[in-house]
Amino acid sequence: MRVIVVGGGVVGTMHAWQAVQRGHEVVQIEREAEARGASLRNFGQIWVSGRAGGEELDTALRARELWERIGAEVPGLGFRAIGSLTPVRNSLEYAVAEAAVARSDAAARGYELVTAEQARKINPALRGDFEAALWCERDAAVEPRTAQLHLREALRATGRYTFLPGREVRDVAGPGAVRDDHGDVHRGDAVVLATGAWLSGLVRELVPELPVRRVRLQMMQTAPLGEPLTTSVADADSFRYYPAYPSAALDRLDAEQAQAPVAAEHKMQLLMVQRQDGGLTIGDTHEYEHPFAFDTLEDPYEHLTEVVEAFLGRPLPKIRRRWAGVYAQCTDTTRVVHRQQVADGVWLVTGPGGRGMTCSPAIAETTADELGW
């Protein structure tokens, strides 16, 4: 079988990986010289802890298993089974963490409520003030800015993979075939459009009423911390954002402890992970209304800096990079991904909604199973 994958981000690359692993030939087409979207502009977190129960959690857990397996084959991914800690600072936040640990699926997530002393043994860099922390043993991390590069190197080594950058696919040229802006037609037994947040052009022509929206976020990266940050770190605002935490305790938190005004305005939470060079990737904000703002704003960065410094008990290293990114999210946020046949032999896979890095291996596996690869 010959598979054409359109899109060079992590979702597209994992579809290429699944096809090659199953013995097929793959041509992957990317409109930029390298992927430049959400696949590079994220935390690199394999984030099991915040996932909703049911299909979303099952997908994340399966993806976590696949990431570890692929990481053993492709060391350049930088797969690290580091887990995560969410420090809590008072009784309201503690109660939400306590309710999470009482969930029926808490063991599958690797949840444990630990004391501040236990949290500091797990992650000694957390020297600031907090009362306890929610530990999630199943969370992990990879290096987002280089993951696709190393995956492609491994794919090329099979002799059954071709990467064609700098080509924008313009139209469907027949069953299992697409035409690019060079006029070349690429024919296969199946085409997967994994175009991420690029939902205009061909995608709009094929699916005018696509149930997917775009979300913009701001993030930053620091100079090396100078010591290991042994886990990912979140703050209690993540309880408000992620679907794993609904409970009466969360309702009380929302009613009795307002977010900081900047965090509320920009729909923020803290997520933080250390890169292999020692720097920290820190975010994030959420913007849903189109057209998106042109500028990145300083207030959210200042808020995140304050939160991080309170947990670390020390000044944040110098900020080296700030950026904005956009990802695609199903308008029905309970759906893991939007997968749709849009033409004869052509399928669109998009809208994982900030879960692309976490869930992409399992999303691609499901596509391959459903299409009978």
Image (spheres, rainbow, N blue to C red):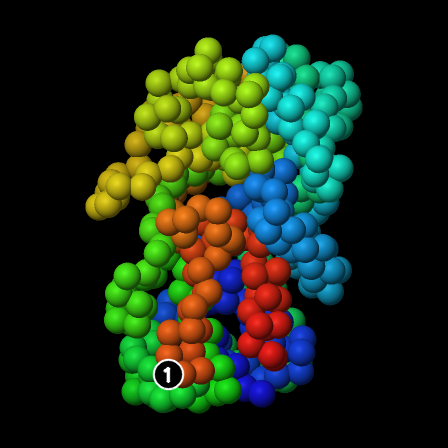
Do we see residue 75 in this rendering? Answer: no
Q: Residue at x 74, y 60 (%)?
A: 69
Q: From what the image shows, is residue 240 above or below residue 72? A: above
Quadrant of image for the N terminus: bottom right
- The secondary element bearing badge 1 is classed as strand
Residue 59: x and y in percent read 62, 53
Which residue sits furthest left?
Answer: 291
Q: Residue at x 36, y 46 (%)?
A: 215
Three-letter amino acid code of the residue under disc 1: Val
Q: Give left or right: position of 271 versus 213.
A: right
Towards the viewer: 195 or 373: 373
Q: Give left or right: position of 221 versus 110.
A: left
- Counting every numbered tag in the picture gives 1
Residue 253: x and y in percent read 50, 17
Q: Residue at x 62, y 83 (%)?
A: 24
Residue 102: x and y in percent read 70, 27
Q: From what the image shows, is residue 37 above or below residue 368? A: above
Q: Residue at x 56, y 61 (%)?
A: 363
Quadrant of image for the C terminus: bottom right
Do we see residue 76 in this rendering? Answer: yes
Q: From what the image shows, is residue 163 above or below residue 90? A: below
Towards the viewer: 267 or 124: 267
Q: Give left or right: position of 24 versus 177.
A: right
Residue neighbourhood size for the residue with mark 1, other residues' Cα within 10 Å, grouped as few (<14), some (14–19), many (≥20) = many
The image quarter in which residue 199 lies: bottom left
Towards the viewer: 358 or 80: 358
Residue 305: x and y in percent read 46, 24
Residue carrying label 1: 178
